[in-house]
Image (cartoon, rainbow, N blue to C red):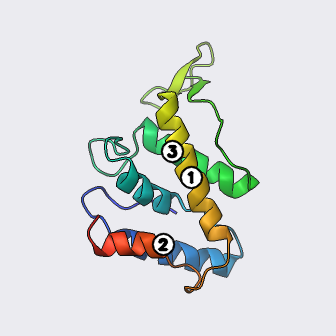
Amino acid sequence: MTWERRDNPGTMQEDLTKIFDTLGNELGVKVAPAGLAWQEARWRLRTVELYFRDGSHPLQTGSYLTASVIYATITAHDPRGAASVIMGHPVSNDGVVDMEKTVPLVDLPQATARELQKIAWETVSARSKPVSSAPGTPSATASARAAAGR
């Protein structure tokens, strides 16, 4: 599931969550709740920017959080302890991969990486457990925060 735009907090994520969960249920597949993790990270880590300047695309922190959510969803394993520096081959603006070079694709402070991993795991774990609200709805905490405009 994708995340809401930076300048549209609250209601957009609730709508995205419902849409992705409905599709996931219809197709019988798990939904990686990246958008809910972004919502939680924006609430808890106010000094960590997830968005590129366009307010839609991710910075390396947003990509790292999303990857942690996908990992936790697919494997059902806690991503805490994963590397905070991820090496890979650079890709040009034209989409050409330079297989001759290896560069840091993500290079986060360890403390930031740990917090993003924790949020990813907590978000995925919360959706894996039975809840009293209807399936596919955000957690009560996320809903309350969205209603408060946070």
Task: Pick the residue in front: 81 or 100.
Answer: 81
Q: Residue 44 carries which label?
A: none
Q: Distance between the residues labelled 2 and 1?
A: 16 Å
Q: Which residue is drawn at 59% across and 23% down?
A: 87
Callout 3 amino acid? Leu
Q: Which mark is residue 116?
A: 3
Q: How far apart are marks 3 and 1 (CA)?
A: 6 Å
Q: Nearer the viewer, mark 2 or mark 1?
A: 1
Q: Where is residue 67 in the image (x, y as percent from the top left)?
A: 58, 45
Q: Nearer the viewer, mark 3 or mark 2?
A: 3
State if disc 1 and disc 3 touch (CB < 8 Å).
Answer: yes
Q: Is mark 3 on a helix, strand or loop?
A: helix
Task: Pick the residue in front: 102 or 138.
Answer: 138
Earlier sequence position, callout 3 versus callout 2: 2
Q: Please name the residue that numbered disc 2 is placed on.
A: 17
Q: Residue 73, relative to residue 27: is it above or below? A: above
When asked about the image quadrant of residue 136, the answer is bottom right
Q: Where is residue 119 in the image (x, y as percent from the top left)?
A: 53, 52
Q: Label 2: how many residues lie within 10 Å, few (<14), some (14-19) or many (20+)?
A: many
Q: Which mark is residue 120?
A: 1
Q: Residue 102, relative to residue 65: is it above or below? A: above
Quarter of the image containing the C terminus? bottom left
Q: Is mark 2 on a helix, strand or loop?
A: helix
Callout 1 amino acid? Ala
Q: Residue at x 61, y 80 (%)?
A: 131
